[in-house]
Image: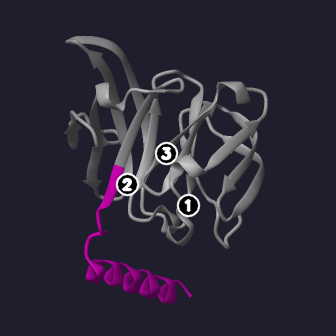
Amino acid sequence: MLAAALTLGAASAAAQEDAGPPAPVRAVFRVFEGTNEITGETRLGVRVSGSDTDTAVLASPPLAVELVPGIYDAQAIHHRDGRVLGVRWAERLVIVTYPDEQGEHLQVINLKPGFGALQLMIPVHVRPDPAAVTVRATGAAATNTRVVGGKGYLLVVAPAGSYDLTVALPSGTETLTAVEIPADRTRMRPVGGDQKR
């Protein structure tokens, strides 16, 4: 039994070596202070988690970089007119490719603690003009939420908590109940297609 397990493990390791290194992930970062987007005033250092050397330094929008799938730390420095206005570390960000992301992995960093983000992915075949889409949130902090557009998605930025969301697309309305927006993290969810999660 042990010999069979060792043989299977060796075969699996050999198959992984033959496959080569994993394809890079296009990681896109957006930075907020509460519900106010400050990506255009942010310098971002990205490094492999636990390392003390930056893998990439991003100084102007779009804050995007090709990364090997893995776990990363990022330091966002908000600056204006030569002055540093705020610094925030985002640690242990999991950067991998998910099937519903349509080629880009989004990470939102918020300088205000306790805020998170929900990325609502809109399938290509139903993708409307973002101005034609509305998202209404209900929950404890619903009045302190903001919805902004992105490439193939809408982004809900809000204090961490549970929300009921009504997403009105030209193709119809979809209600998402008890959606958790985690503190200091970005969650992704597809809407407007055949898949319901």
What residue do we see at 28% from left, 13% from top?
84
Evaluate whether residue 117 shows in this view: yes
- Mark 1 crowd level (few <14, some 14–19, many ≥20, 10 Å Cα): many
- How far apart are the alpha carbons under marks 3 and 2? 27 Å
In the image, is residue 95 part of the stretch drawn in magenta? no
* Above or below, comparing residue 35 to residue 70 in the picture: above
Earlier residue among tags 3 and 2 = 2
Tell me the residue that label 3 is attached to.
149
Tell me the residue that label 1 is attached to.
122
Foreground pick, 77 / 54 = 77
What residue do we see at 53% from left, 23% from top?
34
What residue do we see at 72% from left, 62% from top?
172
Residue 103 picture location, percent across and down: 39, 64
Residue 98 picture location, percent across and down: 48, 64
Q: Which residues are magenta?
A: 1-27
Of badges 3 and 2, the one in the foreground is 3
Q: Tell me the quadrant of the picture where the N terminus can be found.
A: bottom right
Residue 63 picture location, percent across and down: 29, 41
For mark 2, give the secondary structure: strand
For mark 1, give the secondary structure: loop
Disc 3 marks which amino acid? Gly
